[in-house]
C-alpha cells in the first residue's frame, strides 16, 4: 500500500474499520476522512481507499462522484453549498444564491481570491423542512433569508 496518507488518517481509518462489519460499509466515512485531510479527494486518495478496503477502484470512484459532499478540487476555507431543489427554491434559494454571488464576488463553482469561500449549488441537502438551506463545510443551516445569511457569514472567523 502506498504511504500517501498521514499517520493521523491511518489511525482514523483503522478506527472506522473497527466499527463496521464489512469494509464496503466504511467507504463513506473513510472518504470523508481523506477529504478532510486535504480539502478534496484526489485520484490517489481514491486508489488508497480502494486498496485499504479491498474494493475495486471503480466502486470507490462511483461512490465519490455520486455524493455532492465529495470534491475533486480544493475548496475555500468555508465551502458553501446552496440547496436549489424544489422546497428550497420555493423558499428563496435563488435569491440566496444571487446574494452570495454578489456579496462574495464569485460565480457558482468559484472560490474567492483569498481562499476564504467557495460556492456551489447542490440538488438536495435532505433538510427540506428547513428551506431555504445551505451547508457550510459540514454544518447545516436552514430557514435562511438574506439577513440571516449575512449574520451567519459575519459570524465566521
Image (tube, rainbow, N blue to C red):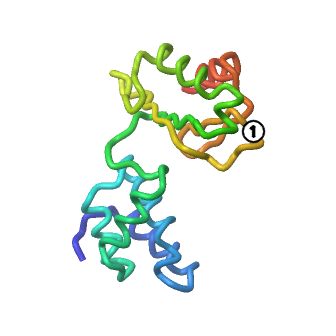
Of residue 124 and residue 35, the one placed in the foreground of this image is 124
Q: Residues within 10 Å of mark 1 (few under 14, many from 20)?
A: some
* Residue positioned most to the bottom: 21
Quarter holding residue 116: top left
* Residue positioned most to the left: 2
* Residue displayed at 24% across by 77% down: 1
Residue 40 at x, y percent in the picture: 36, 49
Of residue 12 and residue 72, the one placed in the foreground of this image is 72
* Residue positioned most to the right: 129
Q: How many marks?
A: 1
* Residue displayed at 31% across by 62% down: 45
Residue 38 at x, y percent in the picture: 35, 50
| Side of 115 where 88 appears, left or right | right
* Image height of 27 relative to 139, above or below: below
| Side of 111 where 95 appears, left or right | right
Mark 1 secondary-structure assignment: helix
Could you tell me which quadrant the C terminus lies in?
top right
* Residue displayed at 24% across by 69% down: 3
Residue 112 at x, y percent in the picture: 38, 23
* Image height of 57 relative to 36, above or below: below
| Side of 132 where 135 appears, left or right | left
* Image height of 19 relative to 66, above or below: below
Residue where numbered disc 1 is placed: 130
Of residue 103 and residue 34, the one placed in the foreground of this image is 103
* Residue displayed at 33% across by 49% down: 72
Residue 123 at x, y percent in the picture: 55, 44
Of residue 27 and residue 38, the one placed in the foreground of this image is 27
Amino acid at each position: 500500500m502506498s504511504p500517501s496518507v498521514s499517520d493521523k488518517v491511518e489511525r482514523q481509518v483503522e478506527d472506522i474499520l473497527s466499527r463496521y462489519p464489512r469494509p464496503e460499509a466504511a467507504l463513506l466515512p473513510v472518504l470523508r476522512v481523506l477529504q478532510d485531510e486535504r480539502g478534496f479527494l484526489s485520484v490517489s486518495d481514491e486508489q488508497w481507499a480502494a486498496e485499504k478496503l479491498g474494493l475495486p477502484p471503480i466502486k470507490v470512484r462511483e461512490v465519490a462522484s455520486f455524493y455532492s459532499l465529495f470534491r475533486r478540487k480544493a475548496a475555500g476555507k468555508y465551502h458553501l453549498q446552496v440547496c436549489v431543489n424544489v422546497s428550497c427554491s420555493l423558499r428563496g434559494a435563488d435569491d440566496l444564491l444571487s446574494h452570495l454571488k454578489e456579496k462574495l464576488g464569485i460565480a457558482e463553482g468559484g472560490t474567492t481570491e483569498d481562499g476564504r469561500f467557495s460556492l456551489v449549488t447542490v440538488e438536495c441537502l435532505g433538510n427540506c423542512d428547513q428551506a431555504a438551506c445551505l451547508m457550510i463545510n459540514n454544518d447545516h443551516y436552514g430557514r435562511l433569508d438574506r439577513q440571516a445569511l449575512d449574520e451567519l457569514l459575519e459570524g465566521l472567523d
